[in-house]
Each structure stands twice: as structure tokens, then as C-alpha cells.
Image: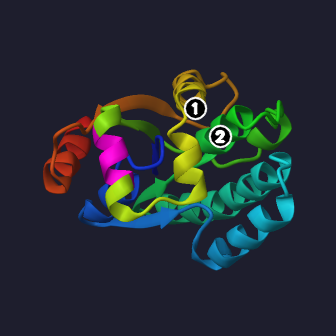
Amino acid sequence: MVVLEGLDGVGKSTLARALPRFVALATPGDDLRDARRAIHAVAAGDPLIPQLFYAASVCAVGRRARALADAGADVVIDRYWLSTIAYGLARGTGVALADVASRVPRPDVTVIVELREDERRARLAARGMTAQDVESLQPSFAEAVRRRLSTPAPNEPVGRLARLDVTALAPAAAARCLLDLL
């Protein structure tokens, strides 16, 4: 069970889809994608509401991923616990959710995917930016997320922590680097 974490636009989704033989999952997951829009709409500026939604989606996707991994499948998840905490804190929730963390299935490896900022901006602009993408481009917000992704608490479900810089790498080359890292 491998988790890919990182800022919006670094290539997590593309990388997850590029891994041969891996079951690719994502949070919030296909079943909750439409709910995500509704959650953000009703949150009306309260960052705690989306953070709790994402925490719940991590629990649901994590249970599915852990069952698949325990049955022998290789599983990769696009975003997981650290993103839930990092984005929530960067948005000002001040809520760490430590009690919930103890119940989240622990991945074997969490990979922080990194990309030079100018490339990340270009990728976001090319794909069309969401409000969350624009938010992630604010330097103080991006730095807060990066800092929190890099410093998980001892009780957080991350497994082995690794980093992968995909700057200037095509998706196939990034996937090969990730497989080598694993």
C-alpha cells in the first residue's frame, strides 16, 4: 500500500495511473467525488468541514486499500492522511485529528511527490485551475502544506516516508523512478 502526497499539480494522479500492476485509488474516491463539491459549497469558508470530509474519505479508501494490499495486490493512493492534515492546517483549522489518525489504515510507504514551483504553476495553468489550485499557489499556503507534509507526527499513518522529485520527468520516467524508490 503506497500513498502519494504533494501539492496540487505535482503529478500524483498521473503518476498513480502510470504504475503498471497497481490498483490506483484516490481520496475522496469515486463514490464521494460529487459530494466534495457540495461539501465545499456548504462549508462557506469554514475549513473544518472539508477537513472532516476528507478525513472520513481517507478512512473509507484506506480500509479498501488495506484489504486489497493484505490480499496481495499492489495499491497506490492519490492523497491520503498527510494531505488531509496539511491542507486543513494551512487553511487555518488548527485541528490535528490525532484520535482519528490512530484508526486510519497505515500505508507501507508514503511518497512525497515534489516538483519545482514554476513547473507546478505551468501544469496547473495548462489543466485549468480550480479554486483549490489557486489557493495552493499562494506562497505562504504552499509552504505551510510542504512543511506539514514533511513532518508527520509519530502516530500518523504514513509508514516509511520517502521523497520523489519529478521535476523535468515525463510520466513514464517518473513512474520508473517511483518503482525504483519502492
* Residue 33 on image: x %, y %: 62, 73
User: Which label belongs to residue 130?
Assistant: none
User: Which label belongs to residue 87?
Assistant: 2
**Label 1 crowd bin: few (<14), some (14–19), many (20+), radius 10 Å:** many
Q: Which image quarter: residue 166?
A: top left
User: Of 90 and 163, which appears nearest the observer?
Assistant: 90
Q: Can the viewer see residue 31?
A: yes
Provide the secondary structure element on which disc 2 rests: helix
* Residue 129 on image: x %, y %: 47, 59
* Residue 126 on image: x %, y %: 32, 59
Dominant secondary-structure state across the stretch colored magenta: helix
**Image marks 2 and 1: residues in contact by CB distance under 8 Å:** yes
Position of 31 compared to 68: left or right?
right
Residue under pointer 1 = 145
Position of 167 compared to 67: left or right?
left
Give the magenta range. 119-124
